[in-house]
Image (cartoon, rainbow, N blue to C red):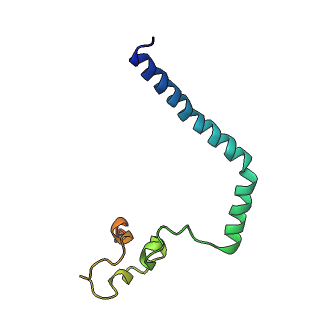
């Protein structure tokens, strides 16, 4: 009968091997889908699309680089946040003065 520590070590070894197998699978999938990724990149460049949408709730949280900086204060600057995603997105840094 195996000791409990042997079983734990065997389980840990199996899980570690499966973890590293995910990296091998990711490399295989990337190589297999390289042509499709390149086609998607050309499609995005042709249409001039921006980055993906982070949140779908408020327009100032959809994409921070495309947001109007004052749209969060439509009612007034001390107004409460209407959307939960507004509390997850940090404010942008002001550009450095030259």
Side of 60 where 18 appears, left or right: right
In this view, the residue farthest toward the front is 1
Residue 29 percent across, percent down from the top left: 68, 45
Q: Nearer the viewer, residue 78 or 17?
A: 17
In this view, the residue farthest toward the left is 78
Residue 85 percent across, percent down from the top left: 39, 69
Residue 75 percent across, percent down from the top left: 31, 88
In this view, the residue farthest toward the top is 1
Q: Nearer the viewer, residue 67 or 95?
A: 67
Q: Nearer the viewer, residue 43 or 57?
A: 57
91 w.r.t. 30: above or below: below
Toward which corner of the image does residue 72 lie, by quadrant? bottom left
Q: In this orientation, does residue 7 appear?
A: yes
Q: Quadrant of the N terminus?
A: top left
35 w.r.t. 98: above or below: above
Count up the numbered dots: 0
| Residue occupying image coordinates x 49% and y 21% | 10
| Residue occupying image coordinates x 37% and y 67% | 89
| Residue occupying image coordinates x 26% and y 82% | 79
| Residue occupying image coordinates x 23% and y 82% | 78
Q: Quadrant of the C terminus?
A: bottom left
Q: In this orientation, does residue 98 appear?
A: no
Residue 73 percent across, percent down from the top left: 32, 83
């Amino acid at each position: 009968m195996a000791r409990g520590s042997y079983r734990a070590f065997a389980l840990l070894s199996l899980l570690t091997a499966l973890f590293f197998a995910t990296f091998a699978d990711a490399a295989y999938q990337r190589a297999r889908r390289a042509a499709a990724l390149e086609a998607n990149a050309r499609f995005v460049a042709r249409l001039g699309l921006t980055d993906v949408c982070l949140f779908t709730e408020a327009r100032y949280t959809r994409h921070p680089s495309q947001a109007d900086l004052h749209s969060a204060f439509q009612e007034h600057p001390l107004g409460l946040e209407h959307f939960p995603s507004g509390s997850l997105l940090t404010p942008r840094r002001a550009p450095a003065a030259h």
